[in-house]
Amino acid sequence: MQKSDVLLEIRNIQASYKEYPALNNVSLDIKKNTVLGLVGESGSGKSTLAKVITGLLQADTGEVVFDGEMLYSKKKHLHRKQQCKQIQMVFQNPEGSLNPKHTIEKILSDAMLFHKITDRAHVKEKCQEWVQRMELPEDTLSRFPSSFSGGQKQRIALARALCVSPKFLIADEPTSALDVSVQLRMLQLIKELKREMGLTILFISHDMGVIYDICDEVAVMKDGKIEETGEKEAFFAKPKTEYGKLLLDSVPTLPYLE
Ligand SMILES: Nc1ncnc2c1ncn2[C@@H]1O[C@H](COP(=O)(O)OP(=O)(O)OP(=O)(O)O)[C@@H](O)[C@H]1O
């Protein structure tokens, strides 16, 4: 693999909460235009890795290189604003990224104006485009986050993340709180937007059916370490490690595989 094919290089990251070592020498390459599924049991360090990539948590050692540029190393934070624009995140709980006191119009326009995606004269039009793209109700822009269903809130959070035209999206269990039909539509939307926007995605999930549906590659985490990585098809056909095998064996059904 050529270096230029890689969007995000994570090199030897160690990260801890006080004395607790949550990430132990994690290295991972994420290729441009791919969806990498990050799986592993609860507490294995998946969200911690996401926090390090987004800069929410400072790593103790290691480096993160984004699109050939050092994002940070040796506790130094570089290119903070650039990082905010290029790397966006959606969480299991969309409320976390939606200010309850702001209308959806304010939430979307503040993000686009801050990152200079458009100017004041055109921002409302852009907000409206996102409402349509996300198949949200017509009156969405004048409403507050609490007035939407879980699935709608998650689509607003996705619009909030993608309206600033990031290159990289971290999706941390974005569909796990949704019922199955709403979950399927959300996954379809993510796939469509990935194609349209040329996004690279780190998709964290416990659901191996969802991972199979949306990902190109899989990385397995256990106890703060990467156990194995590989192409999705190869992983699902024959995991390289006992733990990978255990994860697949513990899945009762894989509806997306049928
Ligand atoms: N703020 C925190 N303070 C102390 N320990 C934490 C904190 N956040 C996470 N941890 C610990 O770090 C380890 C990794 O947690 P993390 O949330 O990254 O796991 P995860 O793989 O994302 O789990 P899940 O799948 O349940 O979301 C766990 O043992 C967790 O208890």
Image (tube, rainbow, N blue to C red):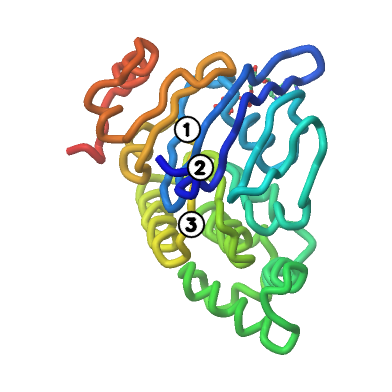
Q: Which residue is depicted at the point 25% across and 34% down? A: 233
Q: CA distance from mark 2 to mark 1?
A: 7 Å
Q: Which SS class for mark 1?
A: strand
Residue 210 placement, left or right of 106? left
- Identify residue type, mark 1: Leu
Q: Which SS class for mark 3?
A: loop
- Identify residue type, mark 3: Leu
Q: Quadrant of residue 11?
A: top right
The circle on residue 200 is none
Q: Residue furthest bottom?
A: 121
Q: Which SS class for mark 2?
A: strand
Provide the residue designation for mark 2: 202
The circle on residue 199 is 3
Instruction: Depth check: give the residue in front, 34 or 193.
Output: 34
Residue 59 placement, left or right of 163? right
Q: Residue furthest front?
A: 2
Residue 153 placement, left or right of 194? right
Q: Which residue is depicted at the point 65% across and 25% down? A: 13
x and y percentages locating residue 166 in the rendered image: 59, 60
Q: CA distance from mark 3 to mark 1?
A: 17 Å
